[in-house]
Image: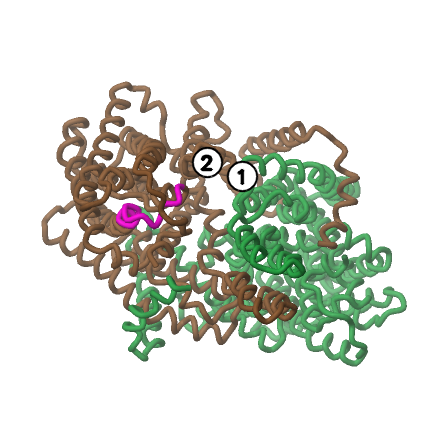
Chain colours: A brown, B green
Amino acid sequence: MRSILALVNPLRALQRGKHTFVLYGALLAYAVMGVTKIIASGGGNESGGHGTAAITFLWIAVILLAAKFSSLIERFKLPAVLGELLIGIVLGNLVLAGLHVFEPIKTDAIITFLAELGVVILLFQIGLESNIQTMRKVGLKALLVAIVGVVVPFVLGTYLVGPLLLPGLSTNAYLFLGATLTATSVGITARVFKDLGRLKSSESQIVLGAAVIDDVLGLIILAVVSAVVTKGSVDAASVSIIVLKAIGFLAGAIIIGGVLAPRLGKIFSKIHTGIGMKFTLALSFGLILAYLAQVIGLAPIVGAFAAGLVLDPVHFKDFKDPDVVDEIKEAVSSAPAELKGKITRAINHHAHRHIEEILEPVGLFLVPIFFVMTGMNVKLETLFNSQILLFAITITGVAIIGKIVAGLVAGNVNKWIVGWGMVPRGEVGLIFATIGKSLGVVNDELYSMIVIMVILTTLFTPPILTYLLNRQGHKAAGAAPTPAKAAA
Amino acid sequence: MRSILALVNPLRALQRGKHTFVLYGALLAYAVMGVTKIIASGGGNESGGHGTAAITFLWIAVILLAAKFSSLIERFKLPAVLGELLIGIVLGNLVLAGLHVFEPIKTDAIITFLAELGVVILLFQIGLESNIQTMRKVGLKALLVAIVGVVVPFVLGTYLVGPLLLPGLSTNAYLFLGATLTATSVGITARVFKDLGRLKSSESQIVLGAAVIDDVLGLIILAVVSAVVTKGSVDAASVSIIVLKAIGFLAGAIIIGGVLAPRLGKIFSKIHTGIGMKFTLALSFGLILAYLAQVIGLAPIVGAFAAGLVLDPVHFKDFKDPDVVDEIKEAVSSAPAELKGKITRAINHHAHRHIEEILEPVGLFLVPIFFVMTGMNVKLETLFNSQILLFAITITGVAIIGKIVAGLVAGNVNKWIVGWGMVPRGEVGLIFATIGKSLGVVNDELYSMIVIMVILTTLFTPPILTYLLNRQGHKAAGAAPTPAKAAA
C-alpha cells in the first residue's frame, strides 16, 4: 500500500481542475478529429508505418468503452451481452444521423479478425464452463428437452415460417434461419438462474444440461448447413458424413485431448510452472483445435468448444502462481494451528488460479468486440419496413414456441420454467447469422430479423423467468458460479 | 474441488495410452499438413469464410508455444525475452534447412498487427511499473548516468562506428543505428537485480531510475529520428519542434491524465465496479494515448508508455473483484479477532487486483508475438558474411563501452555495477530496429547486426553482473517485485 500512497501526493497536486467531462470530451474530440486526419493522410504513416495499427488501436478503445458503458443495462437485471448488441446497433447506425465517423470500423480487417478470435475465445470459455460430467448427470430428460428444443424450431423455421414469410429466398437461407432458431444461449440462461440463486433447482439443472447439449447439436447443425451451402449438395450421404465428422471430431478431441492434456501439462510444467505457461498451453490448445476443426471443414468455434470441454483445472495442477504461494506461506505461518487449514483454503483458490480466471482478461478484451460488431452489422433501415419488422416478431414467436414445446417433455418439473429457460438464443444464434452473412446466404433483411429475434428472446426471458420462479416460490439453496460447479 | 475431482475418473479411464509424444506429434503434424491444404485451397473458405482467421489461429498457437518452450533459457538465469528472440531466429531461418512451412507467418498482416499491439501493451506495462515518483527519487545521479548513457552511444554509433564500418549507407541509417544503441532495457535490468535480491541497493536504484529516464530520452530520440527520416529534413528548428512535441505530449499526458484518470475511474465505477470495467478503462486509456501519439507524429509506444506512467492502482480504488471480496468476508468471519486484520491483508491484494495483474494475461498473449516475430525477421544468411559478423561484434562493443562510460559519472557507488547494469538493450532497441526496417532505412544486414547486438548485450550482462555483485558481496535486503515498489 505504501508504494501506492506514495504516488497519490504528486498527482493530488494535479487534481485541482473540476472539469473532468470537458477535458475528457476534448480528449475524445481530438481523437475523433485525428481519425479524419489519419484517413486523409492515407493511414497516417507519418511515424513508422504504424498508422494503420494506430487507428485500429482507437477503434478497439472505442468499442471496448462503448461495450462497458452499455453494461449499465445490468441495472435492469438484463445480461451485459444485450447491452453490447444494442450499443453496437447504435454505433453502426449513427450514419443514419449523418455521423459517418464510425463507418470505417465495419470494414477494418483487423477488427473483424479480433471479433472472430473473440467468438473462438467465447466458445472456448463456454466449453470450459460446461463439461462432460454435467451432460451425463442431467441425463435423459435434458437430452430429450434439447432434441425437441432443437428439432421443433429448426423444422418450423426452415420448412414453415421461412418459406411462408420470406418467399423467394434460397433453401439455404431457410436452412440458416432454422439453424439460428435452434441454439439456446447457455451463458444467458445460466446467468438468469444464477442471479436468482436457483442454479441448483432441478429445472435449472435440466435447462443447463439441455443448453450444453443444444450447443453441441447446434454446432453439428451449423457444420451440416455450412457444408450444404458451400458444397451446394443436400444428399443424405454427404449430410451424414458431416454429422459423423462433427461427432467424430468432438469425440476424438475429448478422447485424445483427455489423454494429452494432463500429460502435456506435466511435460511443460517441467519447463516452467508459472501462470504464463498455464495460460499459453490452454490458449494454444483452444486455437489449435479451432484450426483443426476448420481443416476438416467444421467451424473453428466447434474446435474451440471441444477444447474447452476437454480442458479442466485438474490438467493444470502442476502449475501455481509463485507470488500467491508465498503469501499463503506467510499468512499460514503466522496463524494458529487450527486456522492454518482455513486460511490456506481461503487463498488456495488463487494459488492454483483456474484457467477460466487466467483467460478472463483475454475474453474481456476480445469477446465484446464480437458482440458490438454483430450489432454494428444490423442495418436498421431494413427494419423501417413494417412488414419485415412484423416478420422479425413472428420469427421471435416461433423461436419462443419451439422452446416452450421442448419444456413439455421435461417430466414432472415446472415445464414453463424449463421452456422459458431455453428461450434465450444469444451467442450461438448470432454466430450462425454472422457465418450465414459471410457466406452470402443470409441477406441484410434476414440478418437484421435474426438479430432482433435474438435481442427480443434475450430481452423477454429474464423478467418472465423471474416471475415464474418467484411464483413457483420455494427457495432453492445458494447459487453456484458455473453450471459445471452447480452440477457437482 | 469436488467438481474437479468428479472429472478425473472418466478422464483417467482414457489415460491408459503411454504414447503422449507420438499422439502430440501426430496432432501437430496433422495441423502442419493442414496448413499446406488450407493455403492450397486459397484460405480454406470451406467453412464460413473463417479460413484466413483459422490459419492465423494456428500461427498464434505456434508462436506462443515456441515462446514458452524457449523459456527453458531461464534455467541458465537468462531472461525469457532472450529465449523468445532466439526461438524466433530459429523459426524464421528454418527455411535455410529447406523447411518453408513457417514462412507465411512473416507476411501475415494480422500477426504483424498483433506484434505491434504487443509492443504497445509492453510499453504500457513498463510505464505502469515505472512512475514519476521513482524518477524523482533517484534524482540527479540517475539523470546524469542516463544522459551520458544515451549521448555517448548515440554519438559513437551515428558519427563514428556507422560511417566507419558501414560506409555508403544513408545518414538516416546511421541515425537509427545510433538510436538503437541508446535505450537501456529496464525490464531486463530490473530482472537481473531482482533475481539476485539486490533491487534495493543504491546501484540498482540508480540503474533503474536511469533506465526509466533512458526510455523517455530514447522515445524522444525515436520521435526525432523517425520524423527526420520521413520528413527528410534535419534542420535544428524541426528537430526542436519534435523534441518539444514529445516532451509536451509526455507532460500533457501526465498532467491531463493525472487529472482525468481518477475522475474517470469514479464515473465509470458508478456504472460497474467489476474487474472488467477496471481492465477496459486501463487498456482503452493506453490505446487512446498510443493513437494520439501517432496523430501528433510520435510513435504509438510513446503514448502507451505515457499512459502507463500516469495510471496507478490508486486511480482504481473504486473497483474490486466481487468473488474475492466474498472470500475475504468468509475467511475473516471465521477467524479470531486478532487474526482478522492479518487475513484481510493477506487476501486484500487480490480483492483490489492491481491493474498490472489484470493486464498480465493480455501481455502473455501479445508480447511474445512481438519478440518471436522480431527474431523471425533476422536473416541469418546476412551473418554468414564474416565481415558483417565482425561489425555486429564491434557494434556490441560500442554499445557496452557507451554504458560503461555512463557508469563512471554515477558518483561514489560501484561504477562497474552501474555501468554493466545499463548494458542490456532489449525491447526499446529492438523496437527502433523494427521501425527503422518498416521505414526502409534499416536494411537486412544492419537489422541483423542490431538484433545480434541486443542479444549479445543481454546475453553477457547477467553473468557479468552476477559476478560483480557477488564480488561486491554485501547482502542487500530482500527483493521487491517492481522498480516502482522498490523505490517506495
Residue sitting nearer the eye, B17 or A446? B17
Residue at x 36%, y 58% (from the top left corner): A308
Q: Quadrant of residue A23?
A: top right
Q: Amino acid at mark 1?
A: His
Outermost residue toward the right in this view: B412
Q: Are marks 1 and 2 in contact (CB under 8 Å)?
A: yes
Q: Quadrant of residue B41?
A: bottom left
Asked if marks 1 and 2 fall on the same chain, the answer is: no
Chain assignment, label 2 = A
Read off the magenta span: A196-208
Q: In the shown orientation, is residue A169 left or right of residue B255?
A: left
As drawn, A207 above or below B377: above
Residue sitting nearer the eye, A473 or B9? A473
Residue at x 42%, y 26% (from the top left corner): A93
Outermost residue toward the left in this view: A236
Q: Position of residue A383 (x, y in %)?
A: 32, 23
Task: Tell me the crowding category of disc 2: few under 14, some 14 to 19, or many 20 or more residues within 10 angstroms, Cα based.
Answer: some
Label count reads: 2
How far apart marks 1 and 2 lie (CA) works out to 9 Å
Residue at x 32%, y 78% (from the top left corner): B19
Q: Amino acid at mark 2?
A: Glu
Q: Position of residue B423 (x, y in %)?
A: 73, 67
Would you name the residue on which mark 2 appears?
A74
Residue sitting nearer the eye, A427 or A444? A427
Q: Is residue B397 visible?
A: yes
Q: Is residue B226 visible?
A: no
Q: In the shown orientation, is residue B421 left or right of residue A293?
A: right
- Which quadrant would the N terminus of chain B be assigned to in this image? bottom left
Would you name the residue on which mark 1 appears?
B272
